[in-house]
Image (spheres, rainbow, N blue to C red):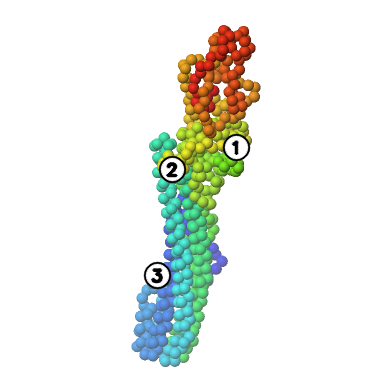
């Protein structure tokens, strides 16, 4: 008899697919279907034995002539016979032995009929009911789990195809895509659905593995029950002639010689490519790759935590996870978790349509419209100025530089912001210079800018006949005229009052 301690062969290529495939080629229902078919085979085997004993009971009443009917009950090949080892020593060999011995039985007695009906058939009937119950249990549990895996895989496949479409659109459109079609967001959606798929696969794997592990014990119980039934059958026909006793003894001996793990080892050996190998580790999202996973459009230019000032004055700053994507969107998320829920931006700014104020230590402002609601929503959305605060000045400088480059603005990077509105020199004259005080001006916001009339351009040379420029103060504009030959408040050359002609300047221009 073969040792029961030997390891059983299993599929080595993975349970539900290799870790480098998002959508495995294997069907999760293959294992459950195979196990269900095996239960069906045992159910039919049990049915064959029930028919055999029932026919024996009936034929006992009609003696030798009726034994031909008994032989017919086992003359047909076993249904799902490929599940049994065809060599001598297994279930298939048992039925072959039954056919040979039944051929030699010619007579039977009524007492044997009564014994068979009262002791043997109930055992097989209970076994048949247990197999049917096991079949229903597996059908409702593992098969349902396989359907959930298929559903999760279909959702993941659709989102991967969607990512492929929009990454291609990103390349062909020069990187300008809608907020909802940003490949970065779609990729995070793939991660979310892939995580759900892996959870369904692992849950289904646990269920199938538990059923598979219990199959060997259940089959041992089936064979033990069959052995018990056949022993009772021998006792029922013990009153018959010695020849009949010898034939039935041979049938029973053949049954008893079947090792409890003989059929299961053969079954595993023949179906090692389909059954689950318990030594194969579970799938992990970190080991899975999918098309366009590393596409340049899915990699953020800068990402991290920022604080944004609430529009309500009393609420202060709130922390969020912000990302600037190659599509030139500034997205706001509650966090960077792709798995807990589908990552959808709380706010999206299309930076080429926005303006950015100056950086002031750890703070900077961005003015624009929320584009997360699509074309119609962004068209109807109001323009808001959003105040951001980084953890350090260096972080603020990094964010400010990336956002400023995405908006397309250029110029100096000092502490005074460039206005988004370009000023014009209405008078066409060269304006006087401006002199700044030693203290730095307060940071200038782009909110509630009002049109003001200013004179001169910053940094223009002072020429004869022109007044000294204006110096911005704390929210006001003061004219400063140095004491000269003309006296205070007069022209340097002629002493005349300073010229009041100026130019219209847009908000924020100096």
Q: Position of residue 35 (x, y in %)?
A: 45, 66
Residue pushed farthest bottom?
110
Q: Callout 2: helix, strand or loop? A: helix
Q: Position of residue 374 (x, y in %)?
A: 43, 43
Which residue appears at 44% of the width and 87% of the height? 117
Among numbered discs 3 and 1, the one appearing first in the sequence: 3
* Among numbered discs 2 and 3, the one appearing first in the sequence: 3
Nearer the observer, 226 or 306 = 306
Q: Which residue is mark 3?
A: 80
Above or below residue 291? Residue 408 is: above
**Which label number is shown at residue 390?**
1
Alpha-carbon distance for marks 2 and 3? 62 Å
According to the image, label 2 marks what residue?
Answer: 377
Residue 147 image-quadrant placement: bottom left
- When the figure is inspected, residue 475 is found, relative to residue 211, above or below; the finding is above
Report which quarter residue 136 is drawn in: bottom left
Residue at left offset 49%, top offset 47%: 344
Circle 1/circle 2 CB separation < 8 Å: no
x, y percentage for residue 201? 49, 57
Label 1: few (<14), some (14–19) or many (≥20) C-alpha neighbours in 10 Å: many
Give the foreground label among 1 and 2: 2
């Amino acid at each position: 008899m073969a040792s029961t301690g030997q390891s059983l062969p299993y599929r080595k290529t993975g349970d539900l697919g290799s870790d480098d495939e998002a959508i495995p080629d294997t069907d999760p229902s293959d294992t459950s279907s195979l196990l269900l078919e095996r239960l069906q085979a045992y159910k039919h085997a049990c049915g064959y034995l029930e028919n055999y004993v029932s026919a024996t009971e009936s034929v006992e009443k009609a003696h030798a002539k009726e034994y031909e009917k008994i032989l017919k009950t086992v003359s047909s090949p076993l249904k799902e016979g490929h599940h049994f080892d065809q060599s001598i020593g297994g279930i298939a060999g048992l039925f072959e032995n039954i056919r040979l011995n039944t051929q030699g039985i010619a007579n039977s007695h009524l007492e044997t009929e009564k014994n068979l009906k009262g002791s043997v058939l109930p055992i097989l009937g209970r076994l048949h009911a247990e197999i049917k119950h096991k079949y229903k249990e597996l059908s409702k549990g593992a098969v349902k789990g396989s359907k959930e895996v298929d559903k999760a895989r279909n959702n993941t496949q659709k989102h991967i195809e969607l990512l492929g479409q929009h990454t291609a659109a990103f390349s062909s459109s020069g990187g300008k895509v809608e907020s909802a079609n940003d490949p970065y967001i779609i990729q995070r959606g793939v991660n979310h659905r892939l995580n759900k798929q892996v959870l369904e696969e692992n849950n289904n794997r646990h269920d199938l593995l538990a059923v598979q592990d219990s199959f060997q014990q259940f089959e041992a119980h089936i064979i033990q029950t069959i052995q018990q039934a056949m022993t009772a059958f021998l006792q029922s026909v013990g009153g018959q002639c010695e020849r009949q006793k010898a034939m039935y003894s041979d049938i029973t001996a053949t049954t008893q010689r079947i090792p409890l793990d003989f059929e299961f080892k053969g079954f595993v050996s023949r179906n090692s490519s389909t059954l689950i190998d318990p030594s194969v580790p579970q799938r992990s999202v970190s080991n899975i790759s999918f098309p366009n996973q590393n596409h340049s459009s899915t990699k953020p230019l800068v990402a991290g935590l920022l604080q944004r000032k609430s529009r309500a004055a009393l609420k202060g700053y709130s922390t969020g996870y912000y990302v600037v994507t190659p599509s030139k969107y500034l997205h706001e998320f509650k966090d960077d978790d792709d798995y807990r829920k589908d990552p959808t931006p709380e706010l999206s700014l299309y930076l080429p349509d926005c303006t950015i104020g100056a950086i002031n230590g750890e703070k900077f402002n961005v003015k624009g419209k929320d584009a997360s609601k699509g074309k119609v929503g962004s068209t109807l959305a109001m323009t808001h100025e959003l105040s951001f605060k980084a953890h350090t000045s260096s972080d603020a400088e990094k964010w400010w530089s990336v956002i400023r480059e995405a908006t397309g603005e250029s110029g100096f990077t000092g502490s005074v912001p460039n206005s988004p509105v370009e000023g014009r020199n209405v008078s066409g004259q060269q304006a006087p210079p401006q002199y700044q005080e030693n203290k730095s001006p307060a940071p200038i916001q782009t909110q509630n800018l009002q049109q003001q009339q200013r004179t001169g351009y910053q940094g223009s040379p002072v020429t004869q006949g022109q007044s000294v420029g204006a110096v911005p103060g704390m929210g006001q504009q003061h004219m400063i005229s140095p004491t000269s030959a003309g006296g205070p408040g007069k022209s340097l050359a002629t002493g005349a009052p300073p010229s009041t002609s100026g130019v219209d300047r847009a908000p924020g221009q100096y």
